[in-house]
Image (spheres, rainbow, N blue to C red):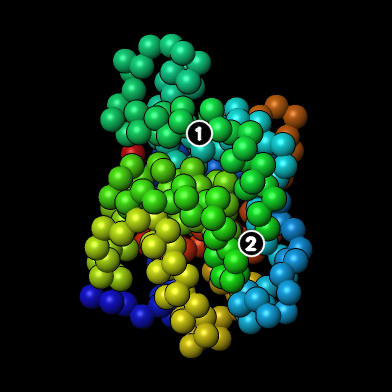
Amino acid sequence: MYQEITPAWMRLQIEISNKQAAINRNLYPIQEQATQMELWEYVPCNCDETCTCKKFGCTHHWKLKKDIRFEDFVTGFLRMFVDCHQHQNILDTLDGKDSTYLNSRAIGAFRVLHSLKKDWAIISAKAASHNKTLFCDDSIDSFFKNHWSFYISESIYKAKQFCLLLPDICIPYDTRSREKLKTHFGLRDINYYQFLAMLRREFIKSMEQNRISLSMMRSFDKPHKQLPFNSNLISLRRPGIEYGTEYVPDERQISIVIDKCFYQPKSCE
């Protein structure tokens, strides 16, 4: 049954998601903050005044930093989307070691990362130069559209990789949140491009009806209320990085905000 997307509904769903994350052994909000600092940058919006994003007061976009190494992308991917007990096993397998110790979910993550590795230079450069959000009129160019022909019933990690590459455009999901999304919007098995186009349409409609600015929407995610930031709890910490003491800035990535409207991590996964 369709549930109207209102500010109150979004805040409640995100709060529930963060409460669950606070008792999950992976402590995902802390991992999101670490990955944000390592991989992404918050840059001025360079769209012209006719772009749809400007209707919602857009001033900045989150995007991939330039010249990110594949190894550093893997670190961010693992801490955000893979159970911490499988991190080293996947790293070892990417280095060519035995894959015996990978469980079924870890195998899915490994396959996506292994496939991405060979085209990393091209895909990462394209993502780093794509300064757009899901709500920009030209958010999806032909390069990425060609990569989004996979059906959402396929590996959840295919979507997750693009969330890291394009944090203000692509929306991740796991097996349970995918079912929630399908039920919420009455979806059949559409491809990922159609999925993003549908989310764009539905959230724009809500933002127009409820007068939600992009800054307001980004700020619905307030993880500090459920899980204080502690850099000592970051998985796969990189030496030499000062991670700070809080979740900053208040304006979070569109991908994570929309994801948390449907995603509730288990207490242990």
Callout 1 amino acid: Leu
Would residue 36 be seen by someone viewing this image from the given angle? no
> Which residue is denoted by mark 1 in the rendering?
116
Q: Is residue 66 above or below residue 264?
A: above
Image point (36%, 16%), residue name:
99
Q: Nearer the viewer, residue 53 or 257?
A: 53
Callout 2 amino acid: Lys
Q: Hey, which residue is sitting farthest top in the picture?
A: 97
Image point (60%, 66%), residue name:
138
Q: Quadrant of residue 196?
A: bottom left
Judge the density around disc 1: few (<14), some (14-19), many (≥20) Cα neighbours within 10 Å. some
Q: Measuring from the top left, give residue 29's x and y in whole percent.
A: 52, 49
Q: Measuring from the top left, give residue 253's x and y in whole percent.
A: 58, 59
Q: Nearer the viewer, residue 245 or 242?
A: 242
Q: Quadrant of residue 42?
A: bottom right
Which mark, by number, is residue 192? none
Label 2, label 1: how many angstroms apart (C-alpha)? 22 Å
Screen quadrant of the C terminus: top left
Q: Measuring from the top left, give residue 212's x and y in whole percent.
A: 56, 81
> Which residue is denoted by mark 2 in the rendering?
132
Image point (68%, 73%), residue name:
58
Judge left or right: residue 46 versus residue 7.
Answer: right
Q: Nearer the viewer, residue 261 or 222?
A: 261
Q: Secondary structure at mark 2?
A: loop
Screen quadrant of the N terminus: bottom left
Q: Measuring from the top left, give residue 41's x and y in whole percent.
A: 71, 51
Judge the density around disc 2: few (<14), some (14-19), many (≥20) Cα neighbours within 10 Å. many
Would residue 76 be seen by someone viewing this image from the given angle? yes
Q: Are marks 2 and 1 in contact (CB under 8 Å)?
A: no
- The first of marks 2 and 1 along the sequence is 1
